[in-house]
């Protein structure tokens, strides 16, 4: 039998078995090239700003799949550590999985060493992971957090490039958002100014980009804690249904009804005592 | 990021599958055990990452040992490789999944989570190789 796993055990990690088949399917014969299903992208506007006491991160909440809005209340600001949050743009599944793994790695580290992780650690782990896969993992990420060395805001590109700046925007709506940020950013803003700035930047992205829309989420990270405001500003185009669309009971007439009783016979009965564990 | 040992990642240090990767004991294609082969399939990897992922651990180790040799001298990688070789031999029977705990601890992979731990976990694999054939292959009797 010519099974490939007969002589050596299976290898864990990514499995490339189907890539030849996929290439053959896509280049296909003349009748039809079979197009692979496209992954859900977040087509986003995300932005971040460093202010006097910490970092403000903002994101819109629309996830698109080609031309359809796949998720109207997508959460794009992910938890990494108690003092670090990140916004992810790009392929939705890639950003979710990558940030989950990053969060797990940092939790293990804090358990090992008893310290809160630093933002540079998160950035380095992400950078190594994304560079290893040469950009195949489509995750454009903005990482922001406050640690013992201060407040930091980083961006990590899908190929592993990083940039450390006081204000940032990423995603398909980044150009309009960057315009607002470049115009009104000042060093050492206070909280309300920073929140208004990020919110306006995301709003500009929502207005000018098809892939961004719906509500605006904000996340304020300071030394004391995190304030996750979801939603900060709701879209004025709320999709409320105008009437009830359920069918009334009795709409479908019943034509016939027959009841068959199942005869069950008790064959065997055993009673087993469960060992409950001690106090919880 | 660890950039010091990158010279060892040049093309000639990455093992490429030869023209007959499924060579049996006589040096030719082992159709009985590995099935028919196609030259096109073996010559080029179908996915750009396939080759680099297959050799990733090897290349990481090579890079780390090179750096260690440059810093501390030849004895450091030699001693470490001796320990790795010993830890690698702690395995269950070939058809059962081994935890490789000692090897992971030596590598420092026991407190990191990567895609190797989440995707395609061999413990949860639905297929198992034939125990007799795999043990005979490992012992060289096959």
Image (cartoon, grey):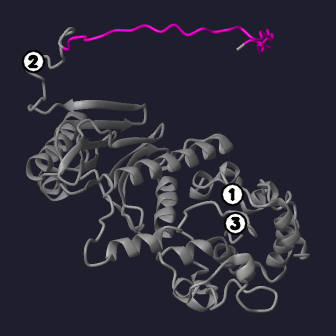
Q: Residue at x 20, y 57 (%)?
A: A172
Mark 3 vs 2, N-terminal side: 3
Q: Label for residue B109?
A: 1
Image location (x, y in percent) of residue A239: 13, 29
Q: Residues within 10 Å of mark 1 (few under 14, many from 20)?
A: few
Residue A30's mark? none
Circle on res. A5: 3
- Image location of residue B3, percent across then percent down: 55, 76
Left/right of residue B95 with respect to residue B47 in the rendered view: right
Q: Is residue B46 left or right of residue B36?
A: left
Locate residue B69 relative to residue A229 in the image: left or right: right
Look at the image and give the residue range highlighted in magenta.
A252-279
- At numbered mark 2, what does the secondary structure look like: helix, strand or loop? loop
Viewer-nearest residue: B77 or B126 = B126
Is residue A207 shown to the viewer in this render?
yes
Q: Is residue B68 visible?
A: no
- Numbered disc 2: what chain? A
Q: Position of residue A144 (x, y in %)?
A: 38, 48
Please give the chain letter of the residue carrying mark 1.
Answer: B
Labels 3 and 2 in the same subunit: yes
* Residue B27 higher or lower than A73, as above or below: below
Taking the spot 32% from the left edge, 43% from the top edge, the residue there is A76
Disc 3 to disc 2, C-alpha distance: 58 Å
Q: Check disc 2 and report the residue beneath it.
A: A243
- Kindly report the distance in space between the C-alpha atoms of the residues bearing marks 3 and 1: 25 Å
The alpha-carbon separation of the residues under discs 2 and 1 comes to 57 Å
Where the C terminus of chain B falls, by quadrant? bottom right
Mark 2 Cα shell of 10 Å, populated few (<14), some (14-19), many (≥20): few
Identify the image quadrant of residue A1: bottom right
Pointer 3 with pointer 1, Cβ within 8 A: no
State the predominant SS element of the stretch in magenta.
loop
Q: Secondary structure at mark 3?
A: loop
């Amino acid at each position: 039998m010519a099974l490939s796993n007969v002589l050596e055990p299976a290898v864990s990690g990514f499995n490339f078995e189907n890539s030849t088949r996929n290439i053959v399917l896509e280049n296909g014969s003349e009748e039809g090239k079979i197009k692979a299903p496209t992954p859900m992208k977040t087509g986003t506007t995300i932005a971040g700003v460093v202010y006097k006491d910490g970092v403000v991160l903002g994101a819109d909440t629309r996830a698109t799949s080609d031309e359809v809005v796949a998720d109207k209340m997508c959460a794009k600001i992910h938890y990494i550590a108690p003092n670090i949050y990140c916004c992810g743009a790009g392929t939705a599944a890639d950003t979710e999985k990558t940030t989950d793994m990053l969060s797990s790695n940092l939790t293990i580290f804090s358990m090992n060493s008893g310290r809160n992780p630093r933002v540079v650690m998160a950035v380095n782990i992400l950078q190594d992971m994304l560079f290893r896969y040469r950009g195949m993992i489509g995750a454009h990420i903005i990482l922001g957090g406050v640690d013992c060395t201060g407040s930091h805001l980083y961006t990590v590109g899908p190929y592993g490039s990083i940039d450390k700046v006081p204000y940032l925007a990423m995603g398909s709506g980044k150009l309009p958002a960057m315009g607002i940020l470049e115009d009104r950013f000042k060093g050492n803003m206070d909280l309300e100014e920073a929140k208004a700035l990020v919110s306006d930047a995301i709003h500009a992205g929502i207005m000018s980009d098809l892939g961004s829309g719906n509500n605006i989420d904000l996340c304020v990270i300071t030394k004391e804690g995190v304030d996750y405001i979801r939603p900060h500003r709701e879209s004025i185009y709320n999709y409320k249904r105008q009437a009830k669309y359920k069918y009334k009971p009795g709409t479908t007439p019943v034509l016939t009804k027959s009841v068959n009783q199942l005869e069950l016979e008790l064959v065997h009965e055993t009673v087993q005592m469960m060992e409950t564990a001690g106090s919880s | 990021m660890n950039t010091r040992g990158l010279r060892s990642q040049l093309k000639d240090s990455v093992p490429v599958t030869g023209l007959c990767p499924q060579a049996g004991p006589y040096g030719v294609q082992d159709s009985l055990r590995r099935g028919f082969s196609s030259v096109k399939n073996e010559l080029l990897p179908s996915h750009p990452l396939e080759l680099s992922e297959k050799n990733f651990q090897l290349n990481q180790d090579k890079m780390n040992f090179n750096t260690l040799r440059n810093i501390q001298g030849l004895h450091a990688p030699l001693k470490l490789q001796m320990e790795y070789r010993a830890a690698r031999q702690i395995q269950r029977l070939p058809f059962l999944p081994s935890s490789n705990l000692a090897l992971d601890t030596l590598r420092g992979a026991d407190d990191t989570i990567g895609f190797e731990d989440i995707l395609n976990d061999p413990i949860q694999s639905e297929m198992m190789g034939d125990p007799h054939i795999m043990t005979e292959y490992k012992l060289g009797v096959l």
